[in-house]
Image: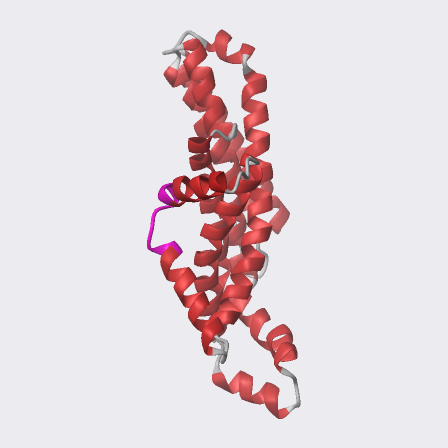
Amino acid sequence: MLAALFLDHPGRPAPAWLRVAWLVGLTAALAAVCWLALAAFTSNWDAIWERRSIFWRGWGLTIGISLAALVLSTALGVLLSLARRSRILPLRSIAILYVELVRGSPLLVQILFLWSVFGLVHFNDRILAGILILSGFSAAYLAEIIRGGIEGVGESQLESARAIGLTTPQTYRFVIFPQAMRNILPALTGQFASLIKDSSLLSIIGIEEFTLAAQQVNSATYSTLESYVPLALGYLLLTLPISGLARLLERRFHYEH
């Protein structure tokens, strides 16, 4: 009976909220099982528990940085995708150059290089710098995802929009973007999950996010495994629900071509 709640039936799929709740519960159960299994082989959990506030602060900062970068990178990605389709040659060239340069080098290299640039202009806000760097990197990938979704809309749709007198902004708002979003949801949510994981690299410039918090606890306790198990579980608790939500949205907005 209980299992039937989570199974699809013809004409009666499981509610979306139930699927999300099931995924979150399964993730929490997996984390608990891993924690208990590892507790049998390690013995310094008391020292980790005493420093739990360090993990909480780092996890909270990771969530804050990721949310801010997600909003900023999405806005910048939309602008870049539109610039790449612009008829203004300089604007289109700048957008193409930016996307290719960012996608052509590792994020770690960009963090080190741009933090050095920030240092030259005496900009010392590490958190804001990290958000800007992470947003700029993710925006280049989002721009290509969004551009691909826009170009996947059939030409007949655009001609129909022009025929009924829609302006270019109206065409994008009412015709192109709704259909493009349907096509790019899986890739879009996948990039959002990658953005959360990429935030761990910001520890290289001293931002006390989740990864650096685990490193600090490890340095203080000399308990490597015990320090990094909460780190792995913390990232899983952030990224697995996003992946599950992506599949739910993909199925909900699926349509036959």
The quarter of the picture where residue 79 lies is bottom right
In the image shown, does 248 or 46 lie closer to the viewer? 46
Q: Position of residue 86 (x, y in %)?
A: 50, 76
Main SS of the magenta part reads helix
- Highlighted range, magenta: 102-109
Q: Position of residue 163 (x, y in %)?
A: 61, 92
The residue that appears at 43% across and 21% down in the rendered structure is: 215
Q: Is residue 3 visible?
A: no
* Residue 257, magenta (yes or no): no
Q: Position of residue 144 (x, y in %)?
A: 43, 63
Q: Is residue 219 left or right of residue 161?
A: left
Q: Please, is residue 85 above or below residue 138 in the view?
A: below
Q: Position of residue 137 (x, y in %)?
A: 45, 51
Q: Please, is residue 54 above or below residue 12 in the view?
A: above
In the image shown, does 166 or 101 lie closer to the viewer? 101
Q: Is residue 121 visible?
A: yes
The residue that appears at 50% across and 65% down in the rendered structure is: 80
Q: Quadrant of the N terminus?
A: top right
In the image shown, does 12 or 227 lie closer to the viewer? 227
The residue that appears at 49% across and 52% down in the rendered structure is: 136
* Residue 104, magenta (yes or no): yes
